[in-house]
Image (cartoon, grey):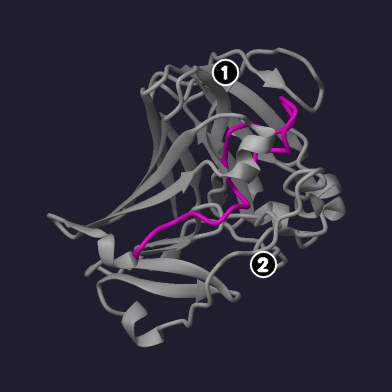
């Protein structure tokens, strides 16, 4: 899953997209109160969720992309300080939604069009959950532009559930057409760490994987460690993974419908070539992605598919 060139992509070679986001003014005072409110990030419209305990999340309407998740007063997601914010270029960091194509496994733009299009959501429609929680649903549906490159009638939701110390992100795909549709997808989660070389990812021991850097198919022995470029596709583990890091970590789980787990870090050499990453940014991030990519997901007319990734602060 080569990541080079992420920031320089266009939505489609035959389809020029300009931002259609409405103007939004940040609401600093409201953003400090528990609940959901309209906000902005670098001029792009967003929705901020905040719990009474202080945990918070920020979701951009571009791509329905989680940009921030703060738990116990600490940021849990990595967002590059050089990330694009022009309204149509992919944003480096947070949790990009890759749909309806993962990477370059098909004719569409890399990682699909969903991450660069404006999704619909209303902070006023966020639901308050018992026990200090918030639920927000963002929606994307087909348009003449999407049907020109992917000829399907669909509706997609990203459902975000924020609970104390926990973030659940669920992708839902509804086939609104009269013919089957097939897609690949991923939640491309960028996790923030203090120093990735001091971290270990546990829970993948004994699993075979595809090493995309070496193009080999070895078996994982022990914990996954980091330092040089790492790009691997594992089958979904049967139990939750744990990111072990000094000072704390995360428990990471995914539904069975996410059939693969992708682990990625660019390492120092590739990171220096990425225009939307600082040279040492690779040390502060690690991607653990819930994915359905080795075989396309097929959705019958009128049917739904859904799958979640869950992040739990340890």
The x, y position of residue 8, in whole percent, is: 81, 53
The x, y position of residue 124, in whole percent, is: 27, 67
| Residue drawn where x is 63% and y is 56% of the image | 284
Which segment is the magenta one?
98-122
Can residue 55 be seen by looking at this rendering? no
Q: Nearer the viewer, residue 139 or 189?
A: 139
Q: Secondary structure at mark 1?
A: strand
Q: Nearer the viewer, residue 202 or 124?
A: 124
Q: Residue 78 falls in which quadrant of the image? A: bottom right
| Residue drawn where x is 49% and y is 78% of the image | 24
Mark pair 1, 2: CA separation: 31 Å
| Residue drawn where x is 55% and y is 21% of the image | 182
Are there few (<14), some (14-19), or many (20+) residues within 10 Å of tag 1? Answer: some
Q: Most extreme residue toward the left, as rendered?
A: 130
Task: Report the residue marked by disc 1.
Answer: 296
Task: Report the residue marked by disc 2.
Answer: 85
28 in relation to 88, above or below = below
Label at residue 96: none
């Amino acid at each position: 899953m080569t990541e080079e060139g992420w920031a320089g992509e266009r939505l489609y070679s035959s389809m020029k997209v300009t931002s259609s986001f409405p103007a939004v003014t940040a609401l600093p005072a409201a953003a400090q109160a528990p609940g959901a409110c309209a906000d902005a990030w670098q001029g792009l419209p967003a929705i901020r969720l905040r719990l009474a305990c202080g945990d918070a999340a920020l979701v951009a309407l571009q791509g329905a992309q989680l940009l921030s998740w703060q738990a116990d007063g600490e940021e849990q997601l990595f967002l590059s300080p050089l990330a694009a914010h022009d309204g149509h270029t992919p944003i480096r960091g947070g949790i990009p939604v890759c749909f309806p194509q993962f990477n370059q496994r098909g004719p569409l733009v890399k990682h699909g069009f969903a991450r660069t299009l404006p999704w619909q959501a209303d902070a006023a429609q966020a639901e308050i959950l018992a026990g200090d929680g918030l639920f927000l649903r963002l929606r994307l549906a087909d348009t003449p532009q999407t049907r020109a490159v992917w000829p399907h009638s669909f509706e997609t939701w990203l459902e975000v559930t924020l609970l104390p110390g926990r973030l659940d992100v669920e992708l839902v795909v509804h086939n609104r057409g009269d013919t089957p549709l097939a897609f690949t997808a991923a939640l491309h989660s960028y996790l923030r760490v203090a120093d990735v070389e001091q971290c270990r990812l546990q829970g993948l021991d004994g699993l075979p994987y595809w090493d995309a850097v070496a193009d080999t198919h070895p078996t994982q022995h022990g914990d996954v460690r980091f330092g040089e470029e790492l790009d691997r596709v594992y089958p979904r583990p049967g139990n939750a993974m744990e990111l072990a890091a000094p000072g704390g970590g995360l428990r990471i789980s995914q539904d069975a419908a996410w059939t693969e787990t992708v682990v990625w870090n660019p390492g120092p050499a590739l990171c220096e070539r990425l225009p939307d990453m600082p040279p040492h940014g690779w040390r502060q991030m690690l991607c653990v992605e819930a994915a359905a990519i080795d075989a396309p997901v097929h959705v019958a007319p009128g049917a739904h598919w859904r799958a979640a990734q869950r992040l739990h602060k340890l």
